[in-house]
Image (spheres, helix red, strand yellow):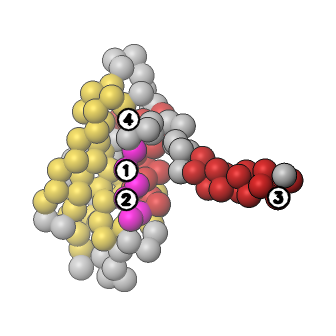
């Protein structure tokens, strides 16, 4: 009896592990291959960004909060972020890195008016 109860507990424990959800990103959050990009999206979600815009061009993915609560002011929802593949010689002109992992670097413009990132190789 004890062995069958132990076996049942161990069997069902594996099933419940897959039911974990990300607190701020929600049930439908799809992980990327980048811890930095995932962290950016989760922080934007936590700070009430209801729609995240992603636009690709010239080797840079630009991410920013398109729809937010009007009274909210926050680093994560007020800035544009540039996502660049991690390479030894890549540098984004006019932006500073806030996170770099094995796959991507996340950069934020130095000036609030800067909306275009350029890769300096």
Question: Considering depth in this image, is 43 or 16 the residue closer to the camera?
Answer: 16
Q: Residues within 10 Å of mark 1 (few under 14, many from 20)?
A: few
**Side (left or right) of 15 relative to 62:** right
Mark 2 in CB contact with mark 1 (< 8 angstroms): yes
**Residue at image mark 2:** 32
Q: Earlier in the sequence, mark 3 or mark 1?
A: 3
Q: Residue 77 bears which disc, if any? A: 4
Mark in the foreground, 1 or 4: 1
- Residue at (16, 56) in percent of width and height: 56
Picture coordinates of residue 111 (x, y %)? 32, 47
Question: Considering depth in this image, is 120 or 29 the residue closer to the camera?
Answer: 29
Could you give the CA–CA distance between mark 3 and mark 1, rounded to whole angstroms?
Answer: 38 Å
**Residue at image mark 1:** 30
The part of the chain drawn in magenta is 29-34
Q: Residues within 10 Å of mark 4 (few under 14, many from 20)?
A: many
Could you give the CA–CA distance between mark 4 and mark 3, rounded to whole angstroms?
Answer: 53 Å
Could you give the CA–CA distance between mark 2 and mark 3, rounded to whole angstroms?
Answer: 41 Å
Mark in the foreground, 4 or 2: 2
């Amino acid at each position: 009896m004890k062995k069958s109860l132990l076996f049942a507990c161990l069997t069902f424990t594996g099933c419940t592990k897959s039911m974990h959800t990300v607190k701020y990103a929600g049930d439908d959050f799809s992980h990327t291959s980048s811890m930095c990009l995932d962290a950016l999206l989760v922080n934007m979600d936590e700070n009430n960004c209801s729609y995240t815009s992603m636009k690709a061009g010239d080797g840079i993915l630009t991410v920013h909060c398109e729809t937010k609560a009007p009274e909210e002011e926050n680093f994560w929802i007020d800035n544009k972020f540039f996502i660049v593949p991690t390479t030894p010689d890549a540098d984004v002109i006019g932006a500073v890195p806030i996170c770099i992992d094995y796959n991507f670097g996340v950069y934020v413009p130095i000036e609030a008016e800067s909306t275009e990132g350029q890769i300096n190789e």
